[in-house]
Amino acid sequence: MIIARVIGNVWATRKEESLRGLKFLVVQPVVMKYTETGEVYLEGRGDTMVVGDRIGAGETEIVMIASGSSARQSLPDTHIPVDAMVVGIIDKETFESGCGV
Amino acid sequence: MIIARVIGNVWATRKEESLRGLKFLVVQPVVMKYTETGEVYLEGRGDTMVVGDRIGAGETEIVMIASGSSARQSLPDTHIPVDAMVVGIIDKETFESGCGV
Amino acid sequence: MIIARVIGNVWATRKEESLRGLKFLVVQPVVMKYTETGEVYLEGRGDTMVVGDRIGAGETEIVMIASGSSARQSLPDTHIPVDAMVVGIIDKETFESGCGV
Amino acid sequence: MIIARVIGNVWATRKEESLRGLKFLVVQPVVMKYTETGEVYLEGRGDTMVVGDRIGAGETEIVMIASGSSARQSLPDTHIPVDAMVVGIIDKETFESGCGV
Amino acid sequence: MIIARVIGNVWATRKEESLRGLKFLVVQPVVMKYTETGEVYLEGRGDTMVVGDRIGAGETEIVMIASGSSARQSLPDTHIPVDAMVVGIIDKETFESGCGV
């Protein structure tokens, strides 16, 4: 999975019927970096992308994104044409302590 | 999903029978960028690609594209050999206000 | 989908039984570019790849390629371990007029 | 598959219900390199990523990761929205001798 | 499909039960290049990767690799968490004559 920061929204009035009601976010992928003392920080990497969201991620939150057919497994109907979905919101504590190093 | 600008068409007379009737577009992927004041603009990124379209996107419109097996979920028959489909047309308002920042 | 120019063949005597009878081509991916006056031309991009072909594409022809599980949908048996297939041959007219711009 | 070094953990309290109980690791992809004398060493490559783990990989261990729909095949329920899973822990011996060259 | 040269082996004692008995190779992807006189040669490209092998490819042999869910189609049980498999061994003749140009 990749992690990314929520930075905006996208609206599409004309779309596949099965996409109605699904919220689309613009996200900026980020990578986790570790300082020599074990602290974690985030760095933007690559281009913005559009992802579906059913969890209710807010702007500036850091989300975990599943891509491809795996993204669809988070939907009640797995035949919806979506290839990237928010599947979790990363806890802030992940980045505040030097946890995990 | 990625977003892209429609820039042309592709014709293939000889093709898989199951592709008959499906329209193919040439699109230029774009990324959303935000100015310091929160306005949204688009920037071309990467190479042109070919995508199927059943929604009726016109040239210069900005579309949302699903890739991989997810693209096929937008078709009545999911056994059609297509790996990228237009699934929505982005509303112009998305880029005109500084929405989403 | 990507488009590519057929540049050669690959032979594999030892292979998965289910691949017997399938022809493999070497192709050079290309991208479509547009001149200011709207004419279309092709430019090679990225590395050569190997794709299956059941349509009968000849050398120098420009083909449309489906990748991933979508490639397998073009086969009578979708359990064949192939991840890229020719699904169409692009009409020459696509590149000769300034169509689509 | 890619191989990667385990470097940390990620926590997400708000997430898809089906992800509860699954551990998420931060890993740094690595590539295997061979010296002229046939010894193997590892070199970090590309950005950190987040993967699920059911095997119990510890920090600094080198793991093998399956991506896409293949990742889900390692789960009891293949409808979980995860696109990268640890599927094995590479034996240290792989890197200590000049094996495999 | 990509083609690659077999350069080594990987061992993992702790792994998903379903992977037991499957051999894992380290391969260096290569691309086919053509000289002006039509002869074919290979050039290494990109990073080493790990692939499953049931065909019995030996070191230095050039193999064809299927990725993603297509890789699993070469296995008796398609629910094995593997995302890249050797599906053929390229005949040496492919590279010795200027075939295919």
Image (cartoon, coloured by chain):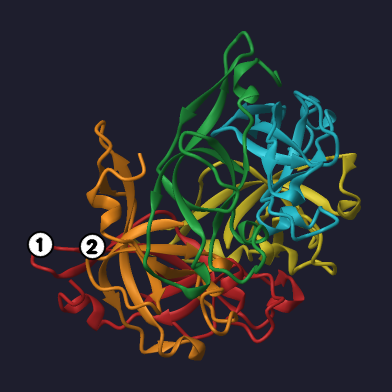
Chain colours: A yellow, B cyan, C green, D red, E orange
Residue D84 x %, y %? 55, 69
Q: Quadrant of the C terminus of chain E?
A: top left
Nearest to the observer: residue A75 or residue E65: E65
Mark 1 and mark 2 residues within 8 Å of each other at the beta carbon? no
Callout 2 amino acid: Lys
**Depth check, front residue: D80 or B60:** B60
The amino acid on which the numbered mark 1 sits, given as a three-letter code, is: Glu
Q: Is residue C48 left or right of residue C56?
A: left
Q: Is residue A99 visible?
A: no
Q: Is residue D46 visible?
A: yes
Specify the quadrant of the image occupied by residue E77: bottom right
The residue singled out by tag 1 in the image is D36
Q: Is residue A54 above or below residue B35?
A: below
Identity of the residue furthest to the left in this view? D37
Residue D35 percent across, percent down from the top left:
14, 63
Placement of B8 over or under A40, stated as above or below? above
Badge 1 sits on which subunit?
A: D
Residue shown at 60% from the left, 18% from the top: C96
Instruction: Tell me how far mark 1 sits from mark 2, CA to CA.
Output: 10 Å
Image location (x, y in percent) of residue A76: 84, 69
Residue C97 at x, y = what percent? 65, 15
- Badge 2 density bin: few <14, some 14–19, many ≥20, Cα 10 Å: some
User: Which is more toward the observer, D43 or B40?
Assistant: D43
